Image: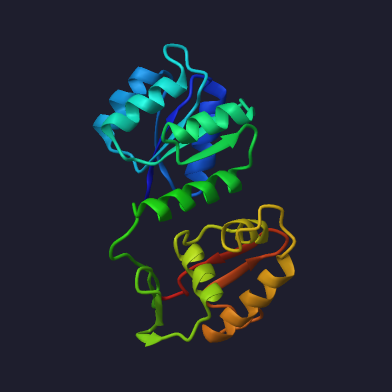
Amino acid sequence: MPHVLVIEDDADVRAALVRALQSHGYATSTTGTGLSGLAELSGSGPDVVLLDLGLPDLDGTEILRMARAVSKVPVIVVTARDEERSMVRSLRDGADDYLVKPFSPQLLDARIRAVLRRSGANDGPRELAVGGLSVDVAGRIARLDGVVLDLTPREFDMLTYLAERPGQVVTRRQLVVDVWQLAHGGAENTVDVHLSWLRRKLGESAREPRYLRTVRGVGVSLVAPDGT
């Protein structure tokens, strides 16, 4: 579970960010000032930092430079400042990404996962298990009851995404944004087709599901079959 440190002075925005992050499976810690954020960065060892620029003690750009002097942890600037000059300055000062408020929880999740991939923060052996289904994320191998599944790259990515959220209902929109990396949607039918193919390879159907349970009008979840 990646740990995200939120440095944001607005209590309402901070609470909204925490809700969004926790709904996508992140551990969180928060602080309302830049200097306390630096102390938290040194103490808690987060995997990603979300940094607001309009902080009450020091400007976020100063905090960014100070953070870069002591840590290589990925930093995503989250701010209402939409000027190109601010974006360029932040990226030059060491920010890994720049998000202008407001933004969707899905986009935030996608950006965090992207910087984690680039930084290698989640590298190393990692295996997910749901019932008799196991997913070796680093090796990109999925097994059902010990038998290797013949999955396409997209099927594997989708299965991994669901296995990271066992029992959680995931919408087609989330899959489009996070697996297909399409911020504006438009591939919901493609998701349905790939889910159908994945069901077949898991030895089930929509009428007789085992692992993939559809919640009509909401989305799909990956669960362990009854009795496992």
Q: Residue at x 59, y 70 (%)?
A: 213
Q: Is residue 156 above or below residue 107?
A: below
Classify residue 70 by image quadrant: top left
- Residue nearest the observer in this picture, 178 or 117: 117
Q: Is residue 133 above or below residue 98?
A: below
Q: Residue at x 28, y 38 (%)?
A: 45
Looking at this view, name the residue that lies furthest to the top: 57
Q: Is residue 100 above or below residue 187?
A: above
Q: Is residue 72 above or below residue 139?
A: above
Assign the C terminus to one quadrant of the image: bottom left
Is residue 157 visible in the rendered structure shown here? yes
Q: Residue at x 53, y 80 (%)?
A: 152
- Residue nearest the observer in this picture, 216 or 101: 101
Q: How is the image coloured?
A: rainbow
- Residue nearest the observer in this picture, 52 or 97: 97
Classify residue 34 by image quadrant: top left
Is residue 228 visible in the rendered structure shown here? no
Residue 127 position within the rendered picture, expressed as x and y whole percent measured from the top left: 33, 68
Disc tally is: 0
Residue 143 position within the rendered picture, expressed as x and y whole percent measured from the top left: 39, 81
Classify residue 129 by image quadrant: bottom left
Residue 66 in the figure: left or right of residue 179 = left
Q: Residue at x 64, y 27 (%)?
A: 83
Residue 23 position within the rendered picture, expressed as x and y whole percent measured from the top left: 52, 46
- Residue nearest the observer in this picture, 43 or 195: 43
